[in-house]
Amino acid sequence: MKINWKVRLKNPVFWVQIAAALFVPILAYFGLSWEDMTTWGAIWALLVKAVKNPVVLLSAAVSVFNAINDPTTAGMSDSTRAMTYNQPAKDGESA
């Protein structure tokens, strides 16, 4: 599995995808919404409950896998072109 981690870690969209991939399955499993997370204590308690639950962990892991995988390439690797990037490419250019 060849992924250009250096570039992905520089891309803020990647971090939003990972955050959503982790929190959305947790909120869905426990029947909560973003509005229910009004204190840091509530978020921490939810994360502790999630870590103790194998179904939630598996759901979050699958969701993170989907966020990492590039569906425009075969397999799990980035394209040869994407492996040459030094920064995230903008529309119509290669980095």
Image (tube, rainbow, N blue to C red):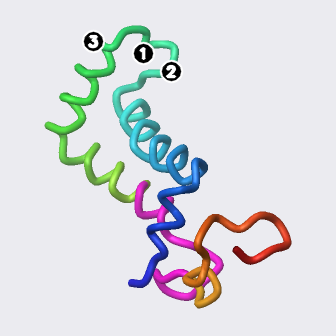
> Is 76 in the magenta?
yes
Label 2 element class: helix
- Against 6, is 18 above or below? above
Furthest toward the front, the residue is 86
Residue 37's disc is 1
Mark 2 → mark 3, Cα distance in angstroms? 14 Å
Write down the region rendered in magenta.
64-78
First in sequence: mark 2 or mark 3?
2
25 left or right, relative to 95: left
Residue to which mark 3 is pinned: 41
Q: Which amino acid does label 2 sit on?
A: Trp
Reply above or below: 13 against 29: below
What percent of the width, then of the height, locates residue 59? 35, 51
Q: Which amino acid does label 3 sit on?
A: Gly
- Characterize the local packing of mark 2: few (<14), some (14-19) or many (20 or more) Cα atoms within 10 angstroms: few
Residue receiving disc 2: 34
Judging from the image, what secondary structure is the residue with disc 3 in? Answer: helix
Q: What residue is shown at x 47% (from left), y 58% (from top)?
A: 9
At numbered mark 1, what does the secondary structure look like: helix, strand or loop?
loop
**68 falls in the magenta region:** yes
Q: x and y percent of residue 1 in the render? A: 39, 84
Q: Would you say 40 lies left or right of 83 here?
A: left
72 lies left or right of 48: right
Q: In the image, what residue occupies the spot 49% across and 21% down? A: 33
Q: How crowded is mark 3: few (under 14 residues within 10 Å), some or many (20 or more)?
A: few
* Residue 48 lies in quadrant: top left
CA gap, disc 1 and disc 3: 9 Å
Rate crowding at label 1 as few (under 14), some (14 to 19) or many (20 or more) other CA atoms within 10 Å: some
Q: How far apart are marks 1 and 2 (CA)?
A: 5 Å
Q: The disc labelled 1 sits on which kind of residue? A: Met
Q: Do the residues labelled 1 and 2 touch (CB within 8 Å)?
A: yes
Main SS of residues in magenta: loop
